[in-house]
Amino acid sequence: MAAAPRDRDDLPYAPYLKPVGGPLSREGDYDTALFEEAEFTEPEAGGARFTECAFSSVTFTGGRLRRARFNDVWLHTVRWVGTDLAQTGWLDAEVVASMLAGLEVFDAELRRVAFHNCKLDSVNLRGSVLREVSFTDCVLRDVDFAGATLTSVSFPGSTLDGVRFDRARLSRVDLRGAAALGITDGFDALRGATVSSAQLLELAPMLAATLGITVRDSG
């Protein structure tokens, strides 16, 4: 069973959080910073580093945070729309009740990242590396994992709709708990994934087509 998301007060660094205002800075270094009820429109914060930071009710619209680093961060009710997060690094991050739409997150690295009750819509994760990542009770719509490497990734209670896995490399990926498996392509990449028997029946026609198997009843 996936661990429940933490409240901000449960974070080990919660007593040290300091409210931060103003625009984000390119190559900025943010340590134990609290971003709350903030709006960042077209931020230019490429290469910024966020360590033991908390984001609560924050909106990011557009902008670039390419190559930014998020280490031991907590994000709650955060709204990301059209932001460039390519080549970012995420370590020990928790994303709760947030919405990510139209994001470029290709060639990123995510390790020990937990998404809870989030909506990911048109998120480009092409070529990214995901290790020990969980999507719990999330909606993933038109999420692109093409060419990505997924290791020890799970989707308990999540709905996959129009998700792509072409040329992805999967290892110890657990799809059994997913509420729906709406996969549009990359069925051959599912080797290395675990599915339930019911899910296998659902996927059978697409797997047969991918393998060139003709299914025809006698007569």
Image (tube, grey):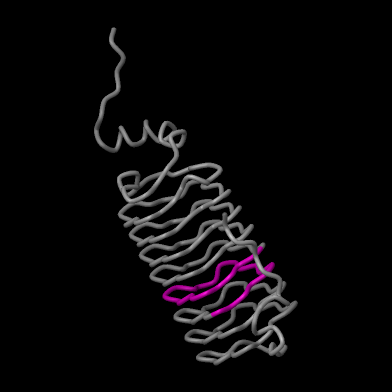
Q: How many marks?
A: 0
* Extreme residue toward the right, this view: 37
| Occupied quadrant, residue 12 | bottom right
- Give the x, y percent position of residue 157: 58, 48
| Residue shown at the point (31%, 14%) measured from the top left | 217
| Residue shown at the point (48%, 63%) measured from the top left | 133
Quadrant of the image containing the N terminus: bottom right
- Give the x, y percent position of residue 162: 48, 46
Seen in the picture, residue 78 relative to 172 is either above or below; the reply is below
Q: On the picture, is 69 further left or further right than 94?
A: left
Examine the structure image and report whether residue 75 is included in the region drawn in magenta: yes
Seen in the picture, residue 46 relative to 119 is either above or below; the reply is below
Q: Which residues are magenta?
A: 72-96
Seen in the picture, residue 181 relative to 69 is either above or below; the reply is above
| Residue shown at the point (41%, 66%) measured from the top left | 131
Q: Is residue 6 visible?
A: yes
| Residue shown at the point (37%, 49%) measured from the top left | 193
